[in-house]
Image: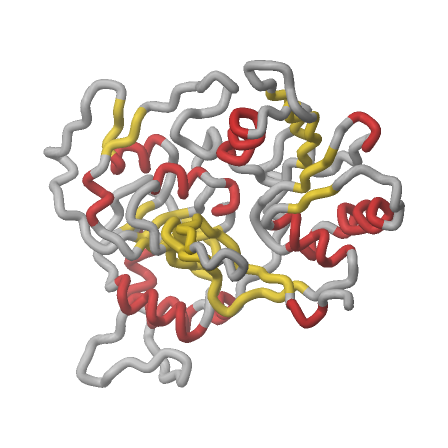
Amino acid sequence: VSIGYNGGAKGCVVFNTAMVGFPEALTNPEQKGLIVVTTWASWVTFTVKTPEKDSLGLCAGFESEHVAAEAVIIPVVTIDPDDEQAPEGHLTVLQWFKENKLPAITGLNTRALVKHIAKHGEMRGEVFVGQTAKQIEKMPLPPSPRLRVERKRPPSPLGRLCHARPEYALAADEDLVAPTSTSDTKVFMPEGDPSVHVGMIDLGVNAGLIRYFVRLAGAKVTLLTANEKPDMGLYDCVVVSTGPGNPAQHPKMIEWIKEHVSDLTSKPLLGLGLGCQIMALAIGCTVQRLHLGQRGTNQPVLDLRTHNCMTTTQNYGYAVDSSSLPK
């Protein structure tokens, strides 16, 4: 059942274990190219505040100005969309889906879908709405060892789609940075005198990262385009930001980092998320696509030095092979 924008979408089907923070998650540029399956149902009763700019000119309560995810699949709608009312200055989640042209569907057995993804790995998928969806339902379901369906049960739309479109078995590599990166240079200033000047290469940075550097670290942040080679003399350090997609899709950035790290007198260079993976490739490491990525706001991480456990937000589908690190 469609409860969002009346349009289709293609992408890599993944699941997210977060219980809250869906406006932030779905507007995170790292979600570009993804069809997100949620494992928590009750969030559809939430309302979303109408976007407003904060003191830095960023959208308050969001990670970017636009929804980045291609589509969202939720378990159950427990309310009547026609009866749901949002307070002034807010939108219902269902209204927010439509306003941001985000396809959203419900009525699927998301538990079975998540188990299928966990077993076979993240794969390409497509959300169909309207007449195309009806055509998919009529497709025959040939036998396959990859998706077993009990004979007593009728063939599912999921099974029909997996067999009708075999090219979705593996996620295709796409350059997802270009549509999420800034098109021009932007500067963000702290309230007082800046403690440091950071040049940040935008590969699809989320607003929370900019807020952290400016408000908590007191840094002046100059946001640079993804294709820009920064003049290291202008900054105290350079950050290669987080972003969506495959790190191997950025050979020019990899070559620039190789040149930089070979100069022992150069300024500090920091990579976060996608940026860290690109830096790893630049020094000769191997980056592999994970069978199953980590996506959620409730991922525990244990610090082996202090034995403190932290609850973290994670969103990645690639990882650096630790055995490939230089000795």
Task: Name the image quarter holding residue 47.
Answer: top left
Foreground residue among 105 and 54: 54
Foreground residue among 267 and 5: 267
**Relative to residue 325, is residue 133 drawn left or right?**
left
**Relative to residue 300, is residue 196 drawn left or right?**
right
Residue under the point 54% across and 66% down: 290
Q: Tell me residue 134's x, y (percent).
A: 28, 58
Residue 201 appears anywhere in the view: yes
Residue 184 appears anywhere in the view: no
Residue under the point 44% across and 25% down: 59
Q: Tell me residue 200's x, y (percent).
A: 67, 34
Query: Against 251, is 51 above or below?
Result: above
Which quadrant does the C terminus fall into? bottom right
Residue farthest along the top direction in this orientation: 192
Foreground residue among 208 and 16: 208
Coloring scheme of the render? secondary structure
Task: Name the image quarter holding residue 301.
Answer: bottom left
**Relative to residue 166, is residue 273 drawn left or right?**
right
Residue under the point 61% across and 53% down: 174
Residue under the point 38% across and 49% down: 297
Q: Tell me residue 24's x, y (percent).
A: 40, 38
Q: Tell me residue 57's x, y (percent).
A: 51, 19
**Relative to residue 266, is residue 237 drawn left or right?**
left
Task: Name the image quarter holding residue 90.
Answer: top left
Residue farthest along the front direction in this orientation: 306
Query: Against 13, is 44 above or below?
Result: above
Query: Against 264, is 317 above or below?
Result: below
Count of labels shown?
0
